[in-house]
Amino acid sequence: MKRKDRIYQFVIEKTTTSTVAQLTDGAALTTAEVADALDLIRSNVSKELNQLVREDKLCKLSGRPVRYCRLIEENGHEKKVNSSPLMAGKRRIHSGLETHLNSEQPTTEISDVFEHMIGNSSSMHNQIEQAKAAILYPPRGLNTLIIGPTGSGKTYFANAMFQFAKNQQLIQKTDELITFNCADYSHNPELLMSHLFGYVKGAFTGANEDKDGLIQEADNGMLFLDEVHRLPPEGQEMIFYFMDHGTYSKLGETSKVHHANVRLVCATTEDPESSLLKTFVRRIPITIQLPAFNKRSAKERIELLKVLLSIEANRTHKQITLTEDVVQSLLGSVTYGNVGQLKSNIQLVCARGFLNNIENKGEIMISVDDLPPNIKDGLVHLASNRRDSGEISKLLEPYMTIQPDSDNHVLTNRNDSYELPYNLYEIIGDKATLLRQQGLDQEHINHFIKTDINLHLKTFSPDEDDMRAEAKLAEIVNQNIIDFTKEIQSKIEKELNYSFQDNFLYAMSLHISSFIKRIQSGKPMRTMSKDLVAMVEDYPNEMKVAQEIKTQLEARYNVPIPESESYYLAILLVSLKIAPTSGKVGIVVAAHGSSTATSMVQVVSQLLSDNTIQSFDMPLDMEPQTAYKEIVDCVKRADEGNGVLLLVDMGSLSTFGSKITDETHIPVKVIDMVTTAMVLEAARKASFIDTDLAAIYSELREFHGYSRINVSNEQKEKHNEISETSLPNTTRPKAIVAICSTGEGTAKKIKNILDQLLVENLIDDIKVIPISLVGMEHHLKKIQANYQIIATTGVTHPKIQAPFMPLQKVLQGGGEAFINKVVERDSLQSFDGKQDVKLTKELCWQYLDEFYTFINPHKITDVLWQYIDQLQSDTQKKFNESFKINLIMHIAGAIERTVTNGAISAPEEELQKLTKSEWYPAVKAVNESNLRRIRIDLPREEVYYIVKLLETWQTKDEKQQEELASNQIIE
């Protein structure tokens, strides 16, 4: 009998005799109860139960925990228990409220729209009470300012306030919310004011008649001013005069002759104290702060996701089913755009899912393989916050199903910038039909339409990233300078016949701003050193262009610019040139067995969306020469010009590195005793900005897992030769180097940013040192003699073994992430070697929870802990902490493979020799005393690999002991 049939039969037997009342009161079965009774893995049971529900064979009752029972027919006064996964809880899903299982109330107009807002009793409770007070306050309410980050729902909240006022009969039913985005005309204050207040005939060219403004249109209603911080000061003054007196004048009038009764709601993403006039802010008594998406509880985030999915289900009239990984990816994909970004991402995913399931009339099934890379990365982003990830996982089932055409109480959000003005699904369907009629197969249809989907959807695209970045730059540099830099870039690229790096706008704008301000303030100018002149002599074309820029700047700002600035500009242009660069460090994983290496690479590829890692599974009966040839091919495929890291498990594989380098001239570094965690860390480091092979190799040798644990007393490789007078590496103070063309303007701005972040993060042992491009190598050697350089940033990469972040990333707000990465990276290198790694049960549990799916870390941790202790005791061996981690992870993998019937193979002749190993009796004994009590009987093949792992460790340990003894004799 199949597993699903066993589960179905068991649920039917246990729930057939129970009444509806008994079932809803707790007689129905939970997933855990079924799993324990049938001795099955809980996640598999949950998957089968949900499938039986989708097949209308079982009912699913909402609540905590979810329960399952027989189908319940609607008869007499009995209320029907919904058979679909979410129909029973649809009102709660779509409104954010807990409702009873069998509520079936007729649809009526909502008198209190806030009652159905997600978070109404938790994160949004105070905000809702403020909004109600602002609306109900006599005689005509209080003016309100809504503050919140981009996409947090300010427009939605304003619409809710308006709907509440209508339902309270404070505004006529026929009125509409009048909305105006102040950013639309922020560069033309006159046009902005004419839209708001109206104008009289002759007020400006083209004003051929009198026209009312939005304030008059909102009379006796509500006016919503979005991005109010973009109002010019004179506009703010006119608004607060109107707030005080209720009167205003049109553009072109001299007296306040017009009257209007308007409830005013404003919104901004900025700090009102710094972006609005104090006199304006004082006249707004109610300030409502909306939370960012990631500041909401896990439950609220999931409910928001369900609400947005229900909108798409209603549009398609199809059930939408997502795997748990998809749900987590979507939640993790929200990085800065809050609910708006989530909505945009959901539209993209559902549109692609609709296309992939276009032949399925009733359901859109979306798995993680259907996600675009940027959303798939959300899974890794979410997993990086273990607390968030854990809370969300507790609330999720293996599948989430959203039913269409449900009464969800979702408020229509007028002027929603993330809402499409048409039904995209109809366009997809029509276009697919047309392409099919033209003879295209499904693969080509999908290719064409996916391109259209990306064009249609208003996603958070790189263009929007650029706009946000430019806005951030405008906080530091005058907009006029930014405009000038954008104007000259294409001309310079055409003249020099090459392109610049992405950070051209930042580096050039900051450089120009710096020396223009110095000139205008009368400060002494920089002098030209001999080094500077000599360097520029090699770049005559750049010098010519620099002099042209100097001439344009003199004309634009009407100031004389000294000749020395031409030299600095020329050096900056050279440094910003895009040079041909090698790719990232390649990774090859090679291990004995039929699928050991492949399995590790698959896990890492799924987590990091990195499909460049090569894997090689070496059968135990394969000759080393044959394996060598295969691995050479893998190394060639992995190489992108920056070397290859070869991660192996044991045996002959660890000897291939130098031979491959001699044959292929590709730098190869080998690390043995590979684990999934090590592959994951290697891939993560390889993706880090400009990390080289030697740096990754050095750090992986010190890697002992994802926890802040101390490294063992192993000898560390020396990367930098330092002078006799320099301080030893362990005592040198740490430094971050900031690089610009002069070492003055831009570099000092970076220093100020990073200094502030270091203070905010309570880090007082890292110094930020600004240096110039001129003589950069000399400056770096001088700094390295007295400091440990742990990171670099600026306009160019200095090509030293330290993490580098480009200038624009720091200025875009990436400075904090940079500091965090630097601290994490440094913490792995700066532990006292005299302290030993300490593996704890908690750390063991974390590893198991992170890397294994089908074993329960709560139950298995104690078993593995006792396994290791007994093995050491029986053999009188002392494992180092690093090997303990490797051994625990290996045995856990063996247990999971055994549970899931994922058998591995080993040559029969090797298995026959197994009993002759000195480790075999000990392994056999601990298996019988520890694993059999949890009903795990490892096959001979798994035992063989455990024995081989122990033999490899013993050989390596004995060699290290010999080397240590030899060193002591020499000393």
Image (cartoon, grey):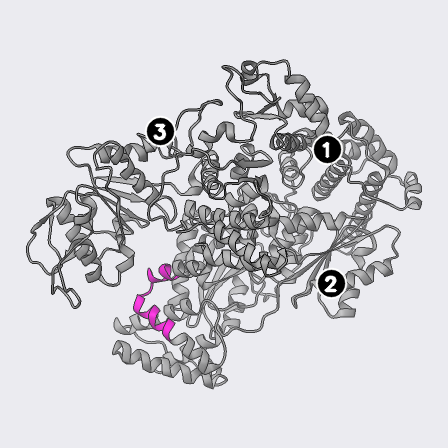
Q: Is residue 435 left or right of residue 410?
A: right
Camera-side mark, 3 or 2: 3
- Where, by quadrant of the figure, is residue 563 drawn? bottom left
Q: Mark 1 highlights which residue?
A: 864
Camera-side mark, 1 or 2: 2
Q: Position of residue 684 (x, y in %)?
A: 60, 53
- In primary-sequence order, the first of circles 1 and 2 is 2
- In primary-sequence order, the first of circles 3 and 1 is 3
Amino acid at the residue labelled 1: Leu
User: Does 892 sit above or below residue 629?
Assistant: above
- Where, by quadrant of the figure, is residue 115 drawn? top left
Q: Mark 2 highlights which residue?
A: 635
Residue 108 numbered tag:
3
Range drawn in magenta? 470-487
Residue in the picture at 47% in, 54% down: 766
Nearer the observer, 268 or 788: 268
Q: Residues within 10 Å of mark 1 (few under 14, many from 20)?
A: many
User: Does 196 sit above or below residue 500?
Assistant: above
Local SS, label 2 = helix
Local SS, label 1 = helix
Amino acid at the residue labelled 2: Val
Q: Residues within 10 Å of mark 2 (few under 14, many from 20)?
A: many
In the rendered image, residue 483 lying in the magenta stretch gets the answer yes
Q: CA distance from mark 3 to mark 2?
A: 67 Å
- In primary-sequence order, the first of circles 3 and 2 is 3
